[in-house]
Amino acid sequence: MIDLDTLLDRRHTADALTAAGFPITASTLATKATRGGGPPYTLFGRRPLYKWADALSWAQSRLSPPAATSSEHHARETA
């Protein structure tokens, strides 16, 4: 269990998110840091650091609502 205030570098953030059930790579986080849409981060010199609470909240916000069938998800996507 990681303390929510812990700062993690990009690789450790990706590893922790993956271990928490949100598969993502460090390179995807890097792309999202450039293009937008990723979790917030701060810089320590040139090194990006992610607060665990922010990264976990970001990943959880990307989850779809629960559905009983795949057609429910499809209906939400096309609505």
Image (cartoon, rainbow, N blue to C red):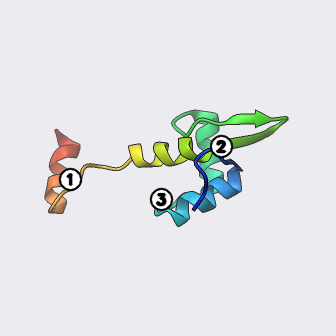
**Side of 62 where 26 appears, left or right:** right
Q: Earlier in the sequence, mark 1 or mark 3?
A: 3
Q: Find out whether the residues at labels 1 and 3 contact each other: C-beta distance under 8 Å.
A: no
Q: CA distance from mark 1 to mark 3?
A: 18 Å
Q: State the mark number for residue 73.
A: 1
Q: CA distance from mark 2 to mark 1?
A: 31 Å
Where does the image place residue 1, in percent across and percent down from the top left? 57, 62
**Residue located beneath label 2 in the image:** 50
The dot on residue 60 is none
- Amino acid at the residue labelled 3: Phe
Q: Residue furthest bottom?
A: 19
Q: Position of residue 79 (x, y in %)?
A: 16, 38
Instruction: Please state the horizontal and vertical placement of residue 69, each as a whole percent of the image.
Output: 15, 62
Q: Amino acid at mark 1?
A: His
Query: Residue 30, located in which quarter of the rendered image?
Result: top right
Above/below status of 68 relative to 76: below
Q: Residue at x 58, y 48 (%)?
A: 4
Label 2 is placed on what type of residue?
Answer: Tyr
Q: Circle 2: is it few (<14), some (14-19), or many (20+) Cα within 10 Å?
A: many
| Tag 3 residue | 22
Q: Give the residue at x 69% y 56%.
A: 11
